[in-house]
Amino acid sequence: MRHFSPLSRPSLLTVLLFALLSLTACEEEVEAPPLAVCTPVLDALSPDEGPVTGGLDVTLTGLWIATDLGERDVKVYLGGQEASVTGVFRSEACNVCDLCTEQVLRCTECERVCRGLESFEDSLTGEVYEPSLCEEWVSFSTPAASAAGSAELMLVNSRGSESGLQFLYTESSGDDDDDAADDDDSADDDDSADDDDSAP
């Protein structure tokens, strides 16, 4: 007759205990609530054109383009080249916008709240917030371009990325800055103090 050691195979009690512990662990695992991550919405560039030499200060306005992390959480690209971000801004009304995205979990509905088109009621406190525009902007300095033409803008932050707006690079216009020493744009340039508009 063969004899089995008590350690040679698990007992029925051990198997049942293991199954019970596994079931308990599954029941205690709580699924995290969904988070509404609203990707950036790009509205406009001001100005939307500038010289190929770059270095122009531009302001981008939109929604969900800036975060509380500031400049280090935003990257802007023009025509595939990274621009230098110089500042970000979010108005106080954006706090209500954020509250909406946390509770409603639908960005399309919250966009009307964020743009100041609808009021919002806090489902936890019952407080009603009157319509107020969430203002956001990102400022940056344009990189130089190899040639004149349109360049697509892309913004990237921790919320996601978005593109679509176009920036127009134009040829440099020389050194015509309307000062007294500038007389190189035409034969009758009257920018100069002693230019009498006569032919050469």
Image: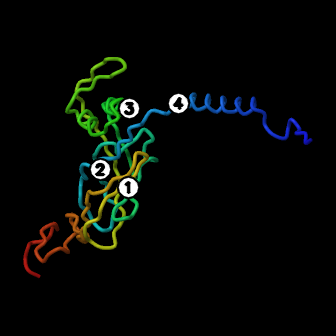
Q: What is the C-alpha distance between the residues marked 4 and 1?
A: 38 Å
Q: Nearer the viewer, mark 4 or mark 2?
A: 4
Crowd around label 3: few <14 · some 14–19 · many ≥20 (10 Å): some
Q: Amino acid at mark 4?
A: Val
Q: Which quarter of the figure is the N terminus placed in? A: top right
Quarter of the figure with residue 195: bottom left
If you read the primary sequence from the N terminus, does the residue marked by circle 4 or circle 1 appear first?
A: 4
Q: Dot 3 corresponds to which residue?
A: 102
Q: What is the C-alpha distance between the residues marked 4 and 2?
A: 41 Å
Q: Dot 2 corresponds to which residue?
A: 60
Q: Nearer the viewer, mark 1 or mark 3?
A: 3
If you read the primary sequence from the N terminus, does the residue marked by circle 4 or circle 3 appear first?
A: 4
Q: Amino acid at mark 2?
A: Leu
If you read the primary sequence from the N terminus, does the residue marked by circle 4 or circle 2 appear first?
A: 4
Q: What is the C-alpha distance between the residues marked 2 and 3?
A: 25 Å
Q: Dot 1 corresponds to which residue?
A: 76
Labels 2 and 1 touching (C-beta < 8 A): yes
